[in-house]
Amino acid sequence: MGVTSVRLQPEIENPLESLSKKLDRSKNYLINQAIKEFLESRAIDEQRWTETMESIDSVKTGKSIDEKAVSEWLDSWGSENELEPPKI
């Protein structure tokens, strides 16, 4: 496990100290949890960006499904004549 030194501003240090005592957890634990959640959030954002760019490329190259076909398929859900999902 690596060791990193961080200087916290008083407006972060003071509430962190209070929360640490309230939760009976170390400041180290809380900081690690916050960083972990931040990194997970960034990974999700990066994945969404990648998927968005792939979607834009698909539309540009004509690899998309007509909105009318999708709507008809969705409208058929739960009916006796449920349609197969539209394909590219």
Image (cartoon, rainbow, N blue to C red):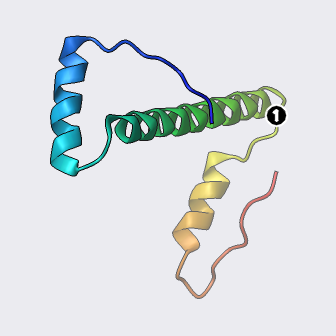
Looking at the image, residue 78 sits to the left or right of residue 10; the answer is right
Point out the image quarter for the N terminus.
top right
Can you say whether 11 is above or below 63 in the image? above
* Relative image position of residue 21 (x, y in whole percent): 18, 42
Instruction: Determine the residue positioned at 71% across, 66% down.
Output: 85
**Is 84 situated left or right of 48 in this image?**
right
- Between 34 and 88, the one lying in front of the other is 34
Question: What residue lies at 75% left-to-right and 32% top-to-bottom?
Answer: 54
Q: Secondary structure at mark 1?
A: loop
Judged left or right of residue 86, residue 17 is: left
Task: Characterize the local packing of mark 1: few (<14), some (14-19) or many (20 or more) Cα atoms within 10 angstroms.
Answer: few
Between 39 and 54, the one nearer to me in the picture: 39
Kindly identify which residue carries mark 1. 62
Q: Between residue 88 and residue 32, name the one nearer to us.
A: 32
Residue 18 appears in which quarter of the rendering? top left
Determine the image quadrant of residue 77: bottom right
- Identity, as a three-letter code, of the amino acid under mark 1: Gly
Q: Residue furthest bottom?
A: 80
Q: Is residue 12 left or right of residue 39?
A: left
Residue 74 pos. (x, y %) = 56, 65
Q: Residue at x 54, y 39 (%)?
A: 40
Q: How many numbered marks does the figure carry? A: 1
Q: Residue at x 63, y 83 (%)?
A: 81
Q: Position of residue 78 (x, y in %)?
A: 52, 81
Residue 56, above or below 51 = above
* Quadrant of residue 61 within the rendered picture: top right
Where does the image place residue 65, in percent across and percent down from the top left?
A: 72, 47
